Image (cartoon, rainbow, N blue to C red):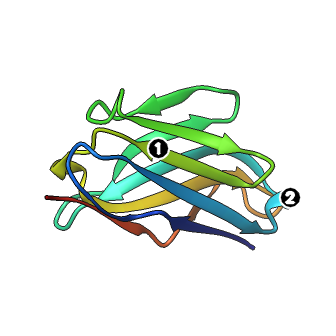
Amino acid sequence: QVQLVESGGGLVQPGGSLRLSCTLSGAVSEVIFVSYSWYRQAPGRERELVASLKVGGNTNYADSVRGRFTISKDNIKNTFDLQMSSLKPEDTAVYFCNAVGSTIMTIGHSYWGQGTQVTVSS
């Protein structure tokens, strides 16, 4: 009923910037969302939370990205972004967007995008 699609991934040099976007579509108006998040996963590693935005205003960031990454939400466009700056090789991973929300039929359902590759290399 709800689909999330990431865009904006690619190759960037160390110290560069990149902006990832997550587009929500489908029956979005039927869902009461409580949070929006970005995760990342490198080969052989567990998926980790990078940034989250709770409905109500609070944001949280992983220690490794705090001060460099910013998560934001555009309610009109039904998108949320991850602005990444001062990128490091260790930021290389597949990045996934996530949203948690509820309907009458699904309580606290976690919606996931398909992932987009971010590679930081010279």
Q: What secondary structure is found at the residue carrying circle 2?
A: helix
Q: Residue at x 35, y 40 (%)?
A: 85
Q: In the rendering, which numbered label is found on residue 47? A: none
The quadrant the C terminus occupies is bottom left
The image shows residue 55 at horizontal and vertical percentages of: 69, 35
Inspect the image, locate mark 2, and give the three-letter code of the amino acid beneath it: Ser
Q: Residue at x 77, y 46 (%)?
A: 75
Q: Which residue is mark 2?
A: 29
The residue lying toward the viewer, choosing from 57 and 118, is 118
**Quadrant in the rendering for residue 12:** bottom left
Q: Residue at x 76, y 54 (%)?
A: 77
Identify whether 6 is placed above or below 68: below
The quadrant the N terminus occupies is bottom right
Identify whether 51 is placed above or below 18: above
Identify whether 71 is placed above or below 63: below
| Disc nearer the start of the sequence (1/2) | 2
- Foreground: disc 1 or disc 2: 1
Q: Which residue is mark 1?
A: 83
The image shows residue 27 at horizontal and vertical percentages of: 82, 68
Horizontal side of 33 relative to 67 (left or right) equals right
Inspect the image, locate mark 1, and give the three-letter code of the amino acid beneath it: Gln
Real-space Cα separation, disc 1 to disc 2, in angstroms: 25 Å
Horizontal side of 19 relative to 36 (left or right) equals left
The image shows residue 80 at horizontal and vertical percentages of: 61, 49
Q: Residue at x 65, y 43 (%)?
A: 73
